[in-house]
Structure formats: structure tokens, C-alpha cells
Image: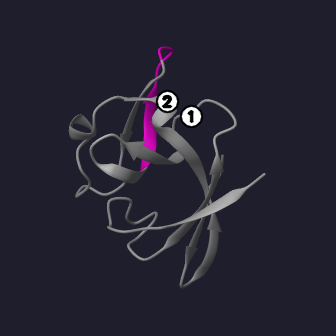
Amino acid sequence: MFWKIFKVSGDSMSPTIVDGDYVLARKFKTKPANGSIAVIQHPSLGRLIKRINFANQAGEILVSGDSDLSTPSEEIGPLHEKLFKYQVFFRISPSGLSSFAH
């Protein structure tokens, strides 16, 4: 299993993950699940780190940031599961390592 580290830029996932933090993620082994945090390669917005809100049987997924200042889900749009590259498991911040329950 290979892990990848991503540096967080912006506060759209605040307070869960904040600007300057790092996240430790690995490739999705299963379909993205509601509540998970994902690294997404958006076709026009580039790399995003967002929470999965809803996934349907057709492979369309809705996401959002945890902050009210995040780009609205409607602007991000429904995304196909193939754009979901990595699932975030850990946050690395100045205060230490935190894990996300999955």
C-alpha cells in the first residue's frame, strides 16, 4: 500500500483541515463513501480536498468543504467517481498527527 502526502492550501476544510496542514492519503480501494475526505482531480478547478456528501449508484458524487467559505457544492458540481484519486486518512499539523475514522 502506497501513501501520498498532500499539502493543504486554503481553509475550505476548516476546522477539520486548515491551510498549511498536510494530509496523508492512499488510493481508493473501494467506491468513495459518504463522509470520507477525498483528494479529487477536478476537470476545471484542479486538485481539491473535500468531504463526500453523497454518492449514487451511477457513480456521481457530490462533495463540499467543511467551512461555510468553501466553494458551494453546486459550483463544484456532481463528479464521476473516476476523478476521486485518494482517500485521506490522516492530518499532519503543527499539533501532531490526527486520524479520520473510516
Residue wearing tag 2: 81
User: Which residue appears at 66% of the width and 46% of the height?
Assistant: 102
User: Which residue appears at 38% of the width and 59% of the height?
Assistant: 13
User: Which residue appears at 73% of the width and 55% of the height?
Assistant: 2
Q: Amino acid at mark 1?
A: Pro
Residue wearing tag 1: 32
Gap between marks 2 and 1 measured at Cα:
7 Å
Magenta span includes 47: no
Contact flag, marks 2 and 1 (Cβ < 8 Å): yes
Magenta span includes 52: yes
Residue 87 appears left or right of 2:
left
Magenta highlight range: 50-58
User: SS class of the residue under badge 1?
Assistant: loop
Q: Nearer the viewer, residue 47 or 32?
A: 47
User: SS class of the residue under badge 2?
Assistant: helix
Q: Residue 96 appears at what percent x and percent y?
A: 62, 80
